Amino acid sequence: MTLIECKNVTKHYYRGTEQITPLKNLNLTIDRSSFVALMGPSGSGKTTLLNLIAGIDRPSEGELNIEGTPIHTLGRNKLAQWRSEHIGYIFQLYNLIPVLTAYENVELPLLLHSISRKERHQRVSHALDVVGISDRYEHYPRQLSGGQEQRVAIARAIVTNPTILLADEPTGDLDLETGTSIMDLLKELQTNQGQTIVMVTHDPRTTDWANTVLHLEKGQLIEQVTT
């Protein structure tokens, strides 16, 4: 079943007087519960596409429908609410708040939702357990390894049970062994929990975990490979 649909999506922005077009007339669909890897050289539009799907940015032209919702038409407040309910974002450099514990970092997205303290605790505990780091919930980021920090970041991304999990170079700052364990975790989330994952990567090894690999170049889809 189609979850994400891009119809003739184009994105412009300006650098001084120069118009930059990172995406041009992009058409693609992404199915629910799939694991998609976006590949391509720098400037090919990968991160731009990720930010459009996240509702962080808007297309200049075209349509972007997610689960039947035309998010390109939503107003600012409705888009922010939609994003908090449907999107989980994993960053390459973790983006954890250093003065908060692992538990508190994971709890943060839930503070935007009208749920009880008890339910927040249950969700955070479950998310930390899923990523295998429940024994580190009182630790601060500086007390964690890079792999542990990324697991906390993944727990924070999944704690709201998002429709889509977006990952921007999730293993780019990790060694091979740690990166492999993170990819195994993401694959487990997709396989066992039906999570839809869209990942930007420069590392061809990480595409082994994906179901579909999309190759972008100069803002256009030039190849789609189903593994």
Image: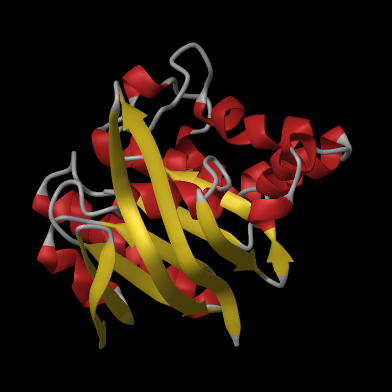
Q: Residue furthest front?
A: 17
**Camera-nearest residue between 124 and 135:** 124
> Would you place residue 191 above or below residue 124 in this image?
below
Image check: 175 left or right of 171?
A: left
Q: Residue at x 50, y 48 (%)?
A: 60
Q: Residue at x 34, y 21 (%)?
A: 143
Position in image of residue 185 (x %, y %): 37, 62
User: Quarter of the image holding residue 108?
Assistant: top right
User: Quarter of the image holding residue 24?
Assistant: bottom left
Q: Residue at x 20, y 58 (%)?
A: 218
**Camera-nearest residue between 78 and 209:** 78
Q: Residue at x 35, y 30 (%)?
A: 14
> Would you place residue 192 above or below residue 56 in this image?
below
Image check: 7 left or right of 145?
A: right
Which quadrant of the rendered structure holds the N terminus?
A: bottom right
Image check: 108 left or right of 188?
A: right
Position in image of residue 100 (x %, y %): 53, 17
> Would you place residue 132 above or below residue 134 in this image?
below
**Camera-nearest residue between 84 and 44:** 44
Q: Is residue 158 visible?
A: no
